[in-house]
């Protein structure tokens, strides 16, 4: 496996996080024994709360989404996540056995590659499950991915392709979550496609808030401005719980998740560190996959409510995101259990 030079900057972070990662894995024991994976400690977003040193040596709070504490209960089994993006490299080791046959809606043929690497990075954060000592774990390592290509070689999302991909995704009854780590100016064709997904009520749309450092109050970007009970928009946080300097925020943004210094797979059996809400969104998508796996009869609105209502409060995020905090996988599982039980009791 080739490892780019920018991964070297994670060395200090790995050293700081290794004790916390090993301690958490001793409790959670998530398959397949991530403590033996030399890259696991660098996946800071998978753990829960910790205190780590900043560049000046001062100890500061740092919250991931605590996926490792949710894994003993569910790892995403039985759930398919549609990744509407740039495509995927089918040879990505951490995605072996995790991929359904995909479709390139720009070229109009089966999906066989990822021209820019973005979709591969995103999909691995959702469902990566390395089978050997190297590789990246996704938040829902037992989930599967339906990769749908909608972008050009320069990264531009094609409206008609995006709409066709959304329609294709909801024809598969196992698709419960659709990840949308992109944004574009509102068009009728994309809005209608989002409305069709929302009308299913069983599929949750997860959108990246975008990297313009803007308040989305007056934004017409899609899918970020598509307010619906079946859609959740995700902002990005850094390792010390602050809103990322590039992240959009405010109206339309319900929750935050880690989006800086995110190590994931890239085409050609490589790894790459990326920053952006494009990385924060699939982390929340992975949480949604865990929830749907544990409670398959849950609606999209119930899963959204569980994620938003149970986020870890962070003072720096008050007023920046709707819930005022960072998504938490085990807290969301607990919240959804309560929501589902209450709904069942009300129906009796």
Image (cartoon, grey):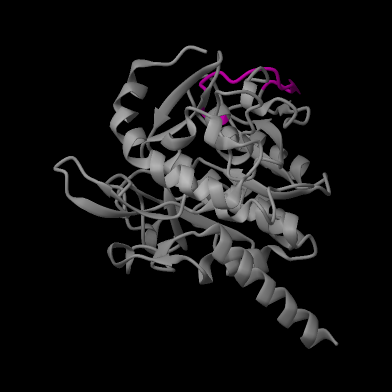
128 versus 300 height, above or below = above
Q: Looking at this view, is 148 or 291 the one in front?
A: 291
Residue occupying image coordinates x 56% and y 15%: 269
In the image, residue 338 lies at what x, y percent? 66, 76
Q: Looking at this view, is 302 or 248 the one in front?
A: 302
In the image, residue 46 lies at what x, y percent? 49, 46
Viewer can see residue 62? yes
Magenta-colored stretch includes residue 114: yes
Q: Looking at this view, is 312 or 185 the one in front?
A: 312
- Most common SS among magenta residues: loop
300 versus 4 height, above or below = below
Residue occupying image coordinates x 22% and y 52%: 59
The mark total stands at 0
**132 to the left or right of 172:** left
* Stretch of the chain drawn in magenta: 107-119
Q: Quadrant of the C terminus?
A: bottom right
In the image, residue 150 lies at what x, y percent? 62, 31
In the image, residue 344 lies at what x, y percent? 79, 80
Residue occupying image coordinates x 49% and y 26%: 155
Residue occupying image coordinates x 64% and y 38%: 127
Residue at the far left: name it.
56
**129 to the left or right of 170:** left
Q: Quadrant of residue 139?
A: top right
Viewer can see residue 185? no
Magenta-colored stretch includes residue 172: no
């Amino acid at each position: 496996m080739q490892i780019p030079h920018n991964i070297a900057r994670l060395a200090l972070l790995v050293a700081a996080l290794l004790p916390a990662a090993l301690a958490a894995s001793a409790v959670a024991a998530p398959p397949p024994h991530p403590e033996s994976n030399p890259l696991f400690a660098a996946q800071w977003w998978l753990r829960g709360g910790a205190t780590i040193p900043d560049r000046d040596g001062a100890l500061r709070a740092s919250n991931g989404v605590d996926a490792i504490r949710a894994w003993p209960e569910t790892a995403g089994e039985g759930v398919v996540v549609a990744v509407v993006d740039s495509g995927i490299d089918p040879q990505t080791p951490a995605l072996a056995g995790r991929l359904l046959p995909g479709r390139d809606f720009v070229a109009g043929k089966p999906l066989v590659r990822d021209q820019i690497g973005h979709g591969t990075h995103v999909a691995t954060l959702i469902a990566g499950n390395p089978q050997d000592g190297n590789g990246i774990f996704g938040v829902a390592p037992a989930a599967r991915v339906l990769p749908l290509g909608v972008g050009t070689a320069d990264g531009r999302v094609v409206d008609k392709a995006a709409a066709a991909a959304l329609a294709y995704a909801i024809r598969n009854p196992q698709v419960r979550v659709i990840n949308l780590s992109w944004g574009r100016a509102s068009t009728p064709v994309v809005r209608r496609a989002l409305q069709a997904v929302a009308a299913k009520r069983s599929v949750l749309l997860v959108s990246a808030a975008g990297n313009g450092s803007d308040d989305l109050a007056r934004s017409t970007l899609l899918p970020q401005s598509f307010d619906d009970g079946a859609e959740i928009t995700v902002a990005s946080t850094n390792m010390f719980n602050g809103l990322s300097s590039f992240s959009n925020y405010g109206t339309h943004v319900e929750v935050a998740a880690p989006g800086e210094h995110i190590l994931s797979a890239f085409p050609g059996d490589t790894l790459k560190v990326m920053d952006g809400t494009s990385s924060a969104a699939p982390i929340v998508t992975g949480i949604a996959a865990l929830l749907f796996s544990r409670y398959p009869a849950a609606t999209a609105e119930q899963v959204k409510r569980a994620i938003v209502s149970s986020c870890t409060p962070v003072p720096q995020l008050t007023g920046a995101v709707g819930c005022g905090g960072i998504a938490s996988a085990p807290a969301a599982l607990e919240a959804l259990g309560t929501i589902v039980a209450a709904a069942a009791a009300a129906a009796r």
